[in-house]
Amino acid sequence: MSEETNTISPMHTPCLGCAFMINEEQKQVGCQVGRIEKYQERGADVIDVYDDNGNEFFVINDRLCVYKRDKEWAKVVSKKQRVTEVERELRLKYHAMVIYDYKHDVEDLFKTMESIDSQNNPPIVVTIINRRTNVAQKDLVKLLTAKDYKNIEWRLQTFFDNDATNRECTDLVVDNTKYEYKVLFYITFRSGFEVPLTVSDEIQKYVVQDMNNLAYAYPNKEENGEIVNINMHLKHAGNSFNIPIVEKLKEFEEGVKPYIHNIEDICPSLKA
């Protein structure tokens, strides 16, 4: 709460009218989902204001609170279900990529795909980057279709150029899907790696609940869990000219370094 005279910026969030606002006699005393405290912890300007009708409430300056829900929304969601529903609505949309190469057989691929399918928040699409050109694509499609994954949509993209790097393959996947799937980021895994069940929840907590910005995450030492913000990828043409996207970010994206992390800092379950 600020005791100084503050200027409210054009971008702000008034808590007045929010279904999660806690009031006592027209005075806001808190937030049911703890966002006031979270914003204060992050150094946001939280202003205590009042209107002509005697309502006293908080304004989150320079921020758009993604948890704010109005009375119309609250009318169709029971009080017991509101937190669960808003968290469902805020589920991150992302693209998972699995690198399937000569080091692993199809059973390894199935293991990775099943672990992704079992995530609490599965990706909206999984691309299998197929580097095993000795396996007929139609046979691989048949085997994957028979698995009948319940929670994921998958696509197969085969690369016949053995000299192409995995990063070049990733760039082509992004180019082929950027208009069809609207995602916040993509994350890559090696075939044969069993993705821990908590990974999607850990990323959700880091970005949404704890309000951390994420431009890039280095993978672990087994090369699993590399995360790239899709807007950053597109802005800097991915890994073009054989320059890794993270090096471009550090060189050309001013102020980005605090938003570059190790995946273990986001997902403790991915510590190799």
Image: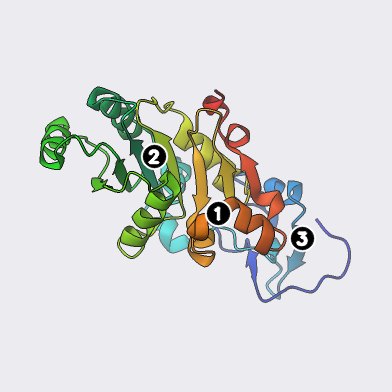
In terms of depth relative to the viewer, which is nearer, 191 or 29?
Answer: 191
Residue 113 x, y percent position in the rendering: 30, 32
At horizontal 58% and vertical 43% (from top left) the residue drawn is: 217
**Could you tell me which quadrant the N terminus lies in?**
bottom right
Q: Is residue 70 above or below residue 210?
A: below
Location of residue 109 (image quadrant): top left
Q: Secondary structure at mark 1?
A: helix
Three-letter residue code for mark 3: Asp
Residue 121's tag is 2
Three-letter residue code for mark 2: Asn
Residue 245's tag is 1
Three-letter residue code for mark 1: Ile
Q: Secondary structure at mark 3?
A: strand
Query: Looking at this rendering, what residue extends furthest in the front direction?
Result: 163
**Mark 2 or 3 closer to N-term?**
3
Q: Secondary structure at mark 2?
A: loop
Left or right: 212 as drawn, with respect to 2? left
At horizontal 24% and vertical 45% (from top left) the residue drawn is: 156
Q: Is residue 142 above or below residue 8?
A: above
Residue 150's tag is none
Q: Which residue in the protein does label 3 denote?
A: 45
